[in-house]
């Protein structure tokens, strides 16, 4: 392959992989990728990265090679010295487009130490890597940032203690839980509701749903209130024999956010959260580790979830992005593995990269773009992904208007 013999790399096209999870939408990602969805499949996520579960492929001189194989053959050209010194010979992030038609699970992500221990433990038990009853599919933590492309609703972190007490007092079916919240002991309350016998869950949730379902059916309930989602998820995730999912409790205990396009959030490890509806860009550490507690058809591991959770409370920060140039807005987080930004172009202004940067992956969401470096030039259309190796200076320009989202590794943290 000629590329591997060249001292200076060029710009390349990346081909990601679609995940057809049941909760996904059926139009946005197929239209973005110019794919006919004749079978009406759910297109939930579009993955861009080198995770072993679904690695992207690179088009080089009309040949297709897996991104992990390319990195293995030319690590310093693709990743750069900074990334290799800090993370080894791996791309440290995983970039996604998500279309959330139905709610995702109540979930949290592990710390690095928890991931290493959990992955080793499940391997020792002989659980296959792709088995549905795994929480740990790799040994990495999973910090993540997301920025909404449409109106986006999600649950994020535990509410203020005062708000939780108010909910327990104001929702009549929850009044009986107040003794478990003595002295504002959130950990005790949450452990109680997540481990109580199923019969007790049903005795609390059934009257709640009996009261709220008629209002839901009359379109009276508001999507920005937990009552709506309690009923909605009861239809979406019915349990066998008429039982109720204890994940409904979390809907009331977590902050319910309604994000507008361009707003985002950062999910640290241990933060309980769930995506409810909308389309978003998501960037995370290179991991697929999810520990689930309810409202899902996937594997639930309550003991592991309780060991993973941070019980910090308060309103989450909503990210609005920081404009660092005439073209680029960065969504800064504490993560060293990744950094997400939005690039906006028109015919009068081009985007010029920094001299030093991490490996950049950019997906074009609107318009057309020409990406150019000293070695080559590519013309890209909506839905295409551009890969720029580390420290290769480049520029982007358009004849109309264009919007891209960029994943990289921040090298100045």
Image (cartoon, grey):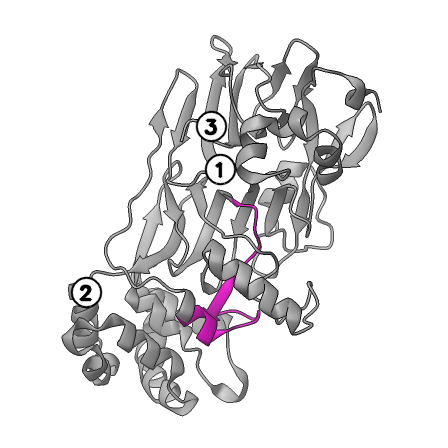
Query: Which of 401 and 62 lies nearest the eye of the viewer?
Result: 62
How far across and how far down the image is residue 234, in percent? Answer: 44, 74
Check residue 142 in the rendering and tell me which mark sits there, or answer none: none
How far across and how far down the image is residue 373, in percent? Answer: 63, 12
Q: Residue furthest bottom?
A: 199
Query: Which of 383 and 396 lies nearest the eye of the viewer?
Result: 396
Q: Which residue is mark 2?
A: 161
- Mark 2 / mark 1, whichever is N-terminal: 2
Which image quarter is the C terminus in? top left
What residue appears at the point 47 percent right and 28 percent down from the top-left corner?
411
Label 1's element? loop
Q: Find out whether residue 300 is within the magenta segment.
A: yes
What residue appears at the point 42 percent right and 65 percent down from the top-left corner?
308
Q: Which residue is mark 1?
A: 338
Which image quarter is the N terminus in? top right
Frontmost of labels 1 and 3 is 3
Label 2's element? helix
Residue interval drawn in magenta: 285-306
Q: Residues within 10 Å of mark 2 (few under 14, many from 20)?
A: some
What residue appears at the point 48 percent right and 61 percent down from the top-left corner?
114
């Amino acid at each position: 392959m000629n590329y591997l013999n060249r001292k200076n790399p060029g710009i390349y096209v990346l081909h990601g992989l679609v995940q057809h999870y049941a909760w996904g939408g059926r139009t946005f990602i197929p239209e973005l990728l110019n794919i006919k969805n004749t079978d009406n499949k759910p297109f939930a996520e579009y993955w861009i990265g080198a995770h072993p579960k679904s690695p992207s492929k690179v088009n080089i001189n009309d040949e297709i090679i897996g991104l992990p194989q390319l990195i293995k053959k030319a690590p310093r050209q693709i990743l750069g010295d900074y990334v290799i010194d800090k993370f080894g010979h791996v791309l440290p992030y995983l970039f996604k487009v998500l279309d959330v038609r139905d709610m995702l699970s109540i979930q949290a992500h592990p710390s690095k130490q928890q991931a290493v221990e959990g992955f080793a433990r499940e391997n020792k038990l002989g659980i296959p890597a792709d088995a549905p009853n795994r929480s740990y599919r790799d040994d990495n933590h999973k910090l993540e940032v997301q920025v909404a492309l449409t109106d986006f609703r999600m649950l994020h972190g535990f509410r203020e203690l005062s708000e939780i007490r108010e909910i327990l007092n104001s929702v009549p079916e929850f009044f009986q839980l107040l003794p478990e919240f003595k002295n504002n002991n959130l950990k005790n309350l949450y452990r109680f509701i997540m481990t109580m016998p199923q019969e007790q869950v049903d005795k609390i949730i059934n009257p709640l749903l009996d009261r709220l379902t008629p209002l839901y059916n009359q379109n009276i309930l508001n999507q920005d209130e937990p009552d709506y989602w309690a009923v909605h998820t009861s239809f979406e995730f019915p349990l066998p024999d008429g039982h109720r999912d204890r994940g409904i409790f979390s809907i009331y205990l977590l902050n319910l956010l309604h994000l507008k396009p361009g707003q985002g959030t950062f999910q640290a490890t241990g933060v309980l959260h769930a995506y409810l509806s909308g389309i978003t860009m998501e960037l995370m550490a290179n991991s697929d580790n999810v520990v689930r507690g309810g409202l899902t058809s996937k594997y639930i591991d309550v003991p592991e979830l309780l060991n993973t959770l941070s019980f910090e409370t308060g309103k989450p920060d909503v990210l609005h992005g920081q404009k660092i140039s005439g073209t680029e807005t960065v969504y800064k987080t504490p993560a060293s593995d990744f950094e997400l930004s939005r690039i906006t172009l028109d015919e009068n202004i081009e985007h010029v990269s920094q001299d030093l940067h991490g490996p950049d992956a950019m997906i074009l969401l609107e318009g057309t773009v020409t990406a150019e470096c000293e070695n080559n030039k590519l013309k890209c259309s909506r839905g295409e992904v551009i890969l720029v190796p580390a420290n290769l200076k480049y520029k982007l320009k358009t004849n109309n208007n264009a919007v891209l989202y960029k994943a990289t590794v921040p090298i100045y943290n």
